[in-house]
């Protein structure tokens, strides 16, 4: 087993044959600790073509158990990363509090046996005291050796970084590229994804890229639960993409802290679904053509006047897309009150069973600033973002919001 705070190689045995191309996340898991959820709380899916003998499809939905005040255990049965050498696979976990000013974070992620993923989420109030809160938990795993049915875009990358700047579990869609981290001063980390850019990778500079940071606090919040790590800057070049991460305590003072960072153009998704050449394969692999993912992300720079009406020309970049109707879609953006925002993803498809995931992160650390997801409306695809100072009081801030919706 391995913990989120400990670097351990993921090598459980080599597969019988190697695939020639990576074709999508090996695992996608979601859980919304929100009531009510209209049945959209959770999913745990894999479309890997050649599963190991001990792994069977379908996998059950993710479950959650509250084991104490502000402490939850997530079980993604059958969803552990597949047997893959460290440089050929990785996984990413994100946690964001919903509808509260709590800090919710990953405290531990373990593999149980060779099949199950077990994660622990803790929530604390702005003083660091355990408190119950709604939250969103997401997990994805990638593998070059266990692939899905469709081509994986080379437009994302992610890594775990320890408080001392060392690299933990990571994944890059550029084989052999790896991830580099510099830690030049307290609270500052510079993460570089070599060869992932507009030339060597598949990132479209016109679309920009979203950056999500999710905090890790292995001591259950005793000393680091109220720390925040944020993407203060990012850039996409021809041959590499970089993200500058700054971590601070609740007063805004620089502090070293562990975190995970995801850079990409598909909001923690990076999943393409395509048609089977042989129509009989839909039945063979238990799939339907309309299976896919809607997603959207917003990087806000807006701190202007509040209004109940959508802002006509907000200062932001965004992407809002879906599978069955390709191409960018519009959004409405509201700044309702100090520290309170709402994004409406327009023209999203809403039908069938839908599994949601959404995460928010602040983009500044002044005064211990942090941002959470606010109210959610499933029918209109509206998601709130609420930002706070280190004491938990509302304050305006810049932020990143990512959303994905798997449907069948």
Image (cartoon, rainbow, N blue to C red):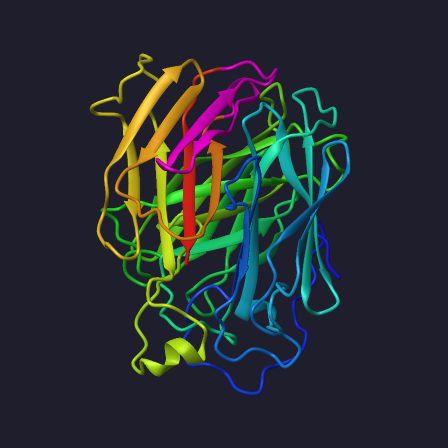
Q: Position of residue 283 (x, y in %)?
A: 41, 77
Against 58, residue 162 (above or below) is above
Q: Residue at 31% across / 14% down in the picture?
A: 307
Q: Residue at 52% across / 39% down in the picture?
A: 37
What span is in magenta? 365-394
Against 23, residue 340 (above or below) is above
Q: Position of residue 201 (x, y in %)?
A: 33, 61
Q: Residue at 41% across / 26% down in the picture?
A: 398
How many numbered marks have been drawn onto this rendered protein structure?
0
Q: Residue at 27% across / 38% down in the picture?
A: 346
Q: Is residue 17 visible?
A: yes
Q: Position of residue 407 (x, y in %)?
A: 41, 55
- 381 magenta-colored: yes
Against 223, residue 2 (above or below) is below
Out of 349 and 369, give the one closest to the viewer.
349
- 356 magenta-colored: no
């Amino acid at each position: 087993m391995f913990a989120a705070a400990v670097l351990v190689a993921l090598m459980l045995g080599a597969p019988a044959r190697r695939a020639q191309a990576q074709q999508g996340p090996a695992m996608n898991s979601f859980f919304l600790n929100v009531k009510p959820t209209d049945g959209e709380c959770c999913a745990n899916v894999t479309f890997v073509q050649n599963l190991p003998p001990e792994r069977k499809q379908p996998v059950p939905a993710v479950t959650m158990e509250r084991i104490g005040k502000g402490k939850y255990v997530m079980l993604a049965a059958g969803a552990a990363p597949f047997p893959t050498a460290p440089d050929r696979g990785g996984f990413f976990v994100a946690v964001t509090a919903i509808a509260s000013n709590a800090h919710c974070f990953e405290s531990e992620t373990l593999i149980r046996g060779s099949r199950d993923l077990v994660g622990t989420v803790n929530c604390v109030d702005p003083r660091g005291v355990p408190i119950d809160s709604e939250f969103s938990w997401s997990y994805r795993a990638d593998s070059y050796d266990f692939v899905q049915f469709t081509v994986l875009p080379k437009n994302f990358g992610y890594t775990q970084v320890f408080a001392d700047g060392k690299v933990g579990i990571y994944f890059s869609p550029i084989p052999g590229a790896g991830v580099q981290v510099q830690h030049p001063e307290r609270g500052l980390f510079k993460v570089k994804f070599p060869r992932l850019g507009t030339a060597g990778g598949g990132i479209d500079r016109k679309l920009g890229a979203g950056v999500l940071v999710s905090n890790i606090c292995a001591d259950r919040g005793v000393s680091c639960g109220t720390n925040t790590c944020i993407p203060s800057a990012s850039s996409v070049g021809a041959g590499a993409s970089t993200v500058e991460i700054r971590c601070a305590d609740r007063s805004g003072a620089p502090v070293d802290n562990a975190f995970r960072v995801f850079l990409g153009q598909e909001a923690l998704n990076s999943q393409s679904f395509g048609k089977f050449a042989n129509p009989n394969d839909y039945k063979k692999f238990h799939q339907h053509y309309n299976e896919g993912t809607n997603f959207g992300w917003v990087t806000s720079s807006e701190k202007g006047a509040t209004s109940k009406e959508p802002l006509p020309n907000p200062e932001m970049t965004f992407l809002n897309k879906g599978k069955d109707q390709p191409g960018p879609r519009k959004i409405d953006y509201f700044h309702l009150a100090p520290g309170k925002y709402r994004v409406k993803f327009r023209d999203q498809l809403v039908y069938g069973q839908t599994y949601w995931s959404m995460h928010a992160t602040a983009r500044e650390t002044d005064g211990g600033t942090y941002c959470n997801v606010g109210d959610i409306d499933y029918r209109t695809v509206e998601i709130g973002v609420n930002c706070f100072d280190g004491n938990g009081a509302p304050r305006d801030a810049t932020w990143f919001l990512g959303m994905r919706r798997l449907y069948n």
